Amino acid sequence: KKTGLNVFGQDMEACPDSKFHTFGEPTKMLQRMSQSLLNIPPVDVEFSDITLTVTHGTCGRRKKTVLKSVSGYFKSGELTAIMGPSGAGKSSLLHVLTGFITKGVEGSIEYSGRKQERKEACYIMQEDCLEPLFTVYEIMTISSTLKLGRGVSQKTTRLLVDNILDMMGLTACKDTRCKKLSGGQKKRLSVALELVSNPPVMFLDEPTTGLDSASSLQCARVLKSLAKGGRTIVCTIHQPSASIMNLFDHVYILCDGHCVYQGSTYNMLPYLRQFGLECPRYHNPADFVMEVVCGDYGSYHTQLIQAAKDDSWEKSRHLPGTELVEDIGSLTSKTYLETTVVPLQSPNEFYKFFILLKLYYIQLYRDWSVSHLKVLLHVVVGGLLGLFFIDSGNDGSKTVNNLSYLFTCIVYLSYTTMLPAALRYPLQRAVVVKEHFNNWYKLKTYYMAMTVSSIPVQLFYCVVNISLSYFISAQPLEWYRFTMMLLMCFMCVLVSEGFGIFFGIIFNPVTGTFCGALFTAYLCLFGGFVILFTHMPKYLHWLSYSSFFRFTFEGIVTSVYSYDRPKLQCPEDVVYCHLSSPEYILKEIGVRGDSYWLNFGVLLLTLVLVKFVAYLSLKKAKHNLHFMVEFEHNPPLVKVVGLCDSDICIFDGPVNATSCTELQSTAICPLMVFHKDLSSVVTSGLWSMLARAMVYEMLVSYNQSVSLKYVEAVTHNCGGVCGCPTVLQPHIL
């Protein structure tokens, strides 16, 4: 038991079950920081009359105002929490303050009186976007190299990395790969990666989501220590525990796009008390304020919005136990004023290009599921193709089979390149968005590194596959013919990869792979073999020029049958062998014998064009890669008694729980969870036709325009707590 008042003005001794922590541990953590991490230029964030309007619906004809003229001021040296119910606009406000969203935004944002600068802030997203195949120390070194460059010695870089890892409590797991870290370790590593550049302003989106209570508290303590080092730390948080809430210096509460309170944590309960809203004893103040803004204690929405404009609640009463923190904060400011901090110049993009290139090759070497299996696949398929078309290359009676072999090589290499490429970028999307937005590198640097890194890899795959099938199928043993065919296949692979990346950028993974398969079918149809050019209708013949399979096929056929190749052999037992003359073969399929380099030039032009269009698509989509501005309704909790042991709750937000125990602990142990745009319902308990019908009627009464499309069943690992069924089939309404 501890005596005195906590941040909420509650008596600590009267709350024996609550663990209200003083600032001792953050202070010790702060004292372990290196001097370079303490020298932070104070940057305050001020915003006024911020309004965010988003468009949705068919062709964007509907508009919804997510943020409605909100203003605020976040001071350096303070840990600020943006709170509010789901759909209140917390994440939207964070996106606007960081500059992640610029479209539809009105108002002004200033950093210490200056115009908003992205380089002064970093944004740590809710999802832990980390490279899974690298260890903690490796990814920290990569971050340091990209941000500090060659101007800092390796010894200094190692010292900085060691200090940050020690401060964040990650030294023990520095040799562990990121994919094997716990949730709390991943969150701390995400913070550590951005500390390399020592940003004065840090924004975090739901840093405690998905963490247990101990990890959440540890994460909050780390943020507290960073704030007391002189930084401006702003994070969104849904419903913190009392221990975590105790660490926040400043609270900004949103409801339905309006600010209903901004001020110190200590003044939050007295602020509500003026409306006759008294927090029950032994009740978590964070839970209480959420219940108030959700309307559980009556409608105080208008009064809270008006009262929030009074800035007198910003001033906090002097609290026992905070003297040491304030002394250290003033010492930090003094240190900064007396010390000249020379900002490190970020390395040029050419240097970053080679760092990313090395990174991708290490990644490729370690990811055996992509590289090793693909090599094995090319070896097996190359051997099988050679065996299927064995001795077809020099046999005049098997010319049609040999043309089939040449076209099959094109289709196989293109298909096995385009579809993985359509998935490559979506798998890297979250990491790229985070690193690009936080100024690790420019988008063009990433794109060039991704493009160049695949060239030798794709060439190796082509050599492995073509070499086996070429010689087994008895193609002409002339090196220049083999080289010309290999070069044409290589160009086809690069063009296919370009289209795959383009599909991956503009579509989601499922749609991208589907479009890739559909596009391959179109290429085959107009490639010149399924329907010969000489047999193709004139009104469709021009479409064949849109298929790069045509130019690849013409180039390969030219390399095999042109350039004065002698007449093919005809077995003695074959009576009719009319396709033994290479000149006649080319004439029959409608291919010119001198068109190789013309076809090569067309493929090269196609490659440049598709790569350029893919890059433009990437630039245009860079602000829509990871986040979607949500504009859900905020329905009240609906309780129906008598359906089962649990109440039915409607909740418009994601459920981050793996068991019913976690659902109960977060007051969301529902029979039904309602979310998004009133179109889907997720069930997690016993369900019946009666219950579905009743909930449907409730939703219709809530919003007449609702269209309840489907009910999706999910299963939680309940362990018998809530009596969840093992299997639930989706029901269509």
Image (cartoon, rainbow, N blue to C red):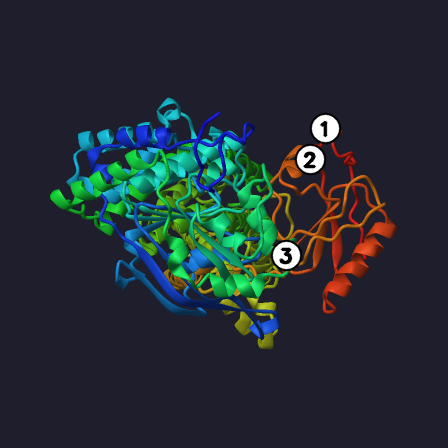
- Determine contact: label 1, label 2, CB under 8 Å: yes
Please rate how many residues cluster around mark 2, counting C-alpha atoms within 10 Å: few if below 14, some from 14 to 19, many from 20.
many
Which amino acid, by three-letter code, is at mark 1?
Gly
Please rate how many residues cluster around mark 1, counting C-alpha atoms within 10 Å: few if below 14, some from 14 to 19, many from 20.
few
Position of 699 with respect to 462 (left or right) is: right
> What x and y, as percent, mark residue 260?
50, 59
> What x and y, as percent, mark residue 627?
49, 55
Residue at position x 43%, y 37% in the image: 220
Secondary structure found at label 3 = loop
Which amino acid, by three-letter code, is at mark 3?
Gly
**Of labels 1 and 3, the one closer to you:** 3
Mark drawn on residue 321: none
Give the alpha-carbon distance from disc 1 to disc 3, as whole Å. Answer: 34 Å
Residue at position x 58%, y 42% in the image: 389
Q: Residue tagged by mark 1?
A: 719
> What x and y, as percent, mark residue 456?
36, 43
Q: Nearer the viewer, residue 465 or 693?
A: 693
Residue at position x 21%, y 44% in the image: 333
Q: Nearer the viewer, residue 589 or 241?
A: 241
Residue extending farthest to the bottom is: 539
> What x and y, as percent, mark residue 455?
37, 46
Give the alpha-carbon distance from disc 1 to disc 2, as whole Å. Answer: 8 Å
- Compared with residue 83, is residue 590 higher up or lower down, i.e. above or below? below
Secondary structure found at label 2 = helix
Q: Residue tagged by mark 2?
A: 660
